[in-house]
Image (spheres, grey):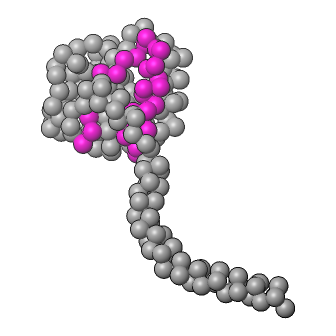
Amino acid sequence: MAFSREHKGEIVEQYREWIDNSKAIYYLTYNKMTMPAINDARAKLRESESEMHVVKNRLFTLVLEEKGYKYDPKTWEGNNVVVFAFEDAPAAAKALTELTKGNEVFVVGGGYLDKALLNANQVKALADLPTLPVMRSMLMGTILAPASQLVRTLAEPARGLAAVIKANSEKQTTAA
């Protein structure tokens, strides 16, 4: 189906908006895609606040060039879908690896993280990272550990003194 120039302009504008609002972009090739497969994929990706879209390769590469992204033209010759991670890049990558595991419909080709080109192995490595809430809790634990240790160190002499006083009072009660 041929698109009018006006319709192509609307598509390009939508691609620009998705790219601008994304923390990461992943691209997958697909083969023998069925509606149940794409609906399952979209549902899994929605959980990580990501979206999957089938793109027009030529129009999408025009937007990539415009935005300063590097790409291999051979990547954009076949059937592609693009995943836009709007919130948490590792969570979207994790959803993609779960989606493609044991699935011959989708194959991760690579992606972009802050305009840096990622290959499929780097996307998998990104998927192995903890999610954003887990990373935040780990960071808070690391930040609070020295303060907690300081409090325990300062409280220890008082605790020791209290234990000595208690033992002394128990000794005096048993002696009396």
Horizontal arrangement in the rendering, residue 160 relative to residue 31 (left or right): right
Please tell me which residue lies in front, 164 or 68.
Answer: 164
Please tell me which residue lies in front, 15 or 75.
Answer: 75
Residue 141 against residue 38 in the figure, above or below: below
Residue 56 against residue 149 in the figure, above or below: above
The answer to whether one can see residue 11 in this image is no
Occupied quadrant, residue 160: bottom right
Occupied quadrant, residue 59: top left
The x and y percentages for residue 53 are 39, 27
Please tell me which residue lies in front, 106 or 97.
Answer: 97
What residue is at 21 percent from the left and 21 percent from the top? 58
Horizontal arrangement in the rendering, residue 88 relative to residue 36 (left or right): left
What residue is at 43 percent from the left and 33 percent from the top? 94
The x and y percentages for residue 107 are 36, 17
What residue is at 46 percent from the left and 14 percent from the top? 103
Horizontal arrangement in the rendering, residue 82 relative to residue 102 (left or right): left
Verify whether residue 98 appears in magenta: yes
Residues rendered magenta in the picture: 87-114
Quarter holding the N terminus is: top left
Occupied quadrant, residue 84: top left
